Amino acid sequence: MDRPEIFTLRIGIRVVHNPMNREVGHCGLFINGGSRDEHENEHGLAHFLEHCLFKGTKHRKTFHILSRLDSVGGELNAFTSKEETWIHASFLTEHFERAIELIADIAFYSTFPEKEIAKEKEVILDEINSYKDSPSEMIFEEFDQQLFGKHPIGRSILGTEESLKTFRKKNVLEFWKRNFTSDNLIFSSVGNIPVVKLRALMEKYIEPHHIPAGSIERVKFKGYRAKNIEVKKDIHQVHTVLGTIAYDYPHKKRPGLSLLNNILGGPAMNNRLSLNIREKYGIAYSIDSSYAPFTDTGIFSIYLGTEKNNLDKSWRLIWKELNTLKEKELSARQLRDAKKQIIGQMALAQDSGGSIMFNIGKSLMLFDRVDSMEEVYENIDEITSRELRDIANEIFDEARMSSLTYTY
C-alpha cells in the first residue's frame, strides 16, 4: 500500500486518498457518530437515519439513488456501528466522479420524506425480528447490554419496536445536524485517480456546502461489574458468551491484545480454541474470540455454540486455554509464528480496496494520521511474550469475566 495523501478542504473536512493502480475504485464518507451518540430518547435513531439517507434527495428519488451506480455495475451502501456511520461506494475507476457526486447528494441534500420514513420503520422492524430468530447474533446484543448497563454503548444499534414508533422527520434531522459537523467527517478514497483530480472533485461537489464546525463529546463508561446470567429459550443448541471490558483504541496495549486474541480464537482455523474444542474433541461447531476497541473502552469476548451436555466440558477447556496464556509465556518460536500469522492476515486484507478505504478513514479520524503497513508491522514486532502474559492476566482475570448463556 502506498502512503496515503491527506488534505483538508476549505470547509474543514479532511480527505484521505490511497492511490492504487486498480480497475476498481472505492470511496466513502465517514461520519464519527453512531448508536452511542444517541440521546436516551433516540434509541436506534443512528441506524434509522442511515436507512433514510437513501429515500430521496432534492435531486433524486429512491429509484434514481439506487440505480445511479448499480446501472454501471457499481455498488452503493451504508452501515452504522456503535461509533460510526459510513456512506460508501465501489465502482469501476472511470465512475469516480459519479460516485462522489452521488455520495455528496445523499449527504447534503437528503429530504427524509415522511412517507418513506413510515415505510422504513417496517423494514427495520423486520431486521430486528430477524435478529431475534438468530440466537448466535442476538446474544451479542444482549451481552453488550449486560456489560454496559444503561450506558449508550450497551444499547442495540437497531433500537426497539417501541423506539422506532416515536421517530419523526424532525428527530432524524436533529440527529443528523448534531453529528454532521466538519470535525466529525472524513472522506476516504482508494483507487487509480490522481490526488489533484480527486481534490478538484472534492472542491466541486463537497466544498461549496456550509458545514458547521464542532465535535461530539462522549460520556465515558464507568462502573463495570461482572455478572453471570443464564436465559431459557426455545432453541436447539446452547449459545454462550464469556467476556469483559477491554482496552480502548489509544491504549498502548491494544496491539498486544489484538495479537493475543488472534492466537486464542482469531479467524485462522489453527487458533487455540478451535484446535482444542472443535478439532480435538469435536464438541462445538462455532467457537471464536473477538476484541472490539472503542474510543474510550473495548470488549473482549469468546463465543461458543454447543450441545447442552457439552457445555461444562467446553467451559473447562476454554479456561484451560486462558490459564495457559496467563501462566506461561510464549516461546520465541510461538511468538514469531503468531506475529507472522497476523502480519500475513493484514497483508491479505490489503488486497481489498474497500477494507483499505475503511481503515485509512477510521485511522485518520481516531489518530489524526495513517500509519504505513511497515510501521504497523514494526509495532507488532515490538510485542514481547512477557507483555502478552501480562495482558492475559489482566483481561482474562476470572473475577472480571461476565457470561451470558442461552439454554433450553
Image (cartoon, helix red, strand yellow):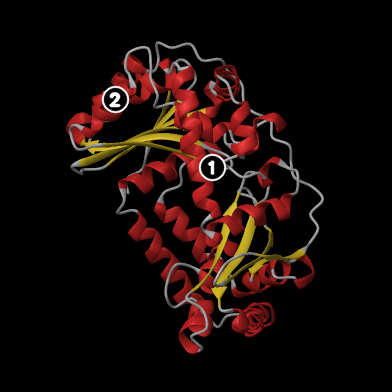
Say if mark 2 contacts mark 1, CB within 8 Å.
no
- Report which residue position mark 2 lands on: 63
Q: Position of residue 38 (x, y in %)?
A: 65, 32
Q: Along the horizontal axis of the image, is 88 left or right of 392?
A: left
Tell me, yes or no, if residue 365 can be seen here.
yes
- Residue neighbourhood size for the residue with mark 2, other residues' Cα within 10 Å, grouped as few (<14), some (14–19), many (≥20): few
Q: Residue, x 45% and y 20% (percent of image)?
A: 115
Tell me, yes or no, if residue 9 can be seen here.
no
- Report which residue position mark 1 lands on: 81
Q: Image quadrant of residue 6?
A: top left
311 w.r.t. 251: above or below: below
Q: Nearer the viewer, residue 351 or 274?
A: 274
Q: Nearer the viewer, residue 146 or 318?
A: 146
Secondary structure found at label 1: loop
Q: Position of residue 89 (x, y in %)?
A: 32, 35
Secondary structure found at label 2: helix
Q: Amino acid at mark 1?
A: Ser
C-alpha distance separating marks 2 and 1: 26 Å
Q: Residue, x 41% and y 27% (percent of image)?
A: 7
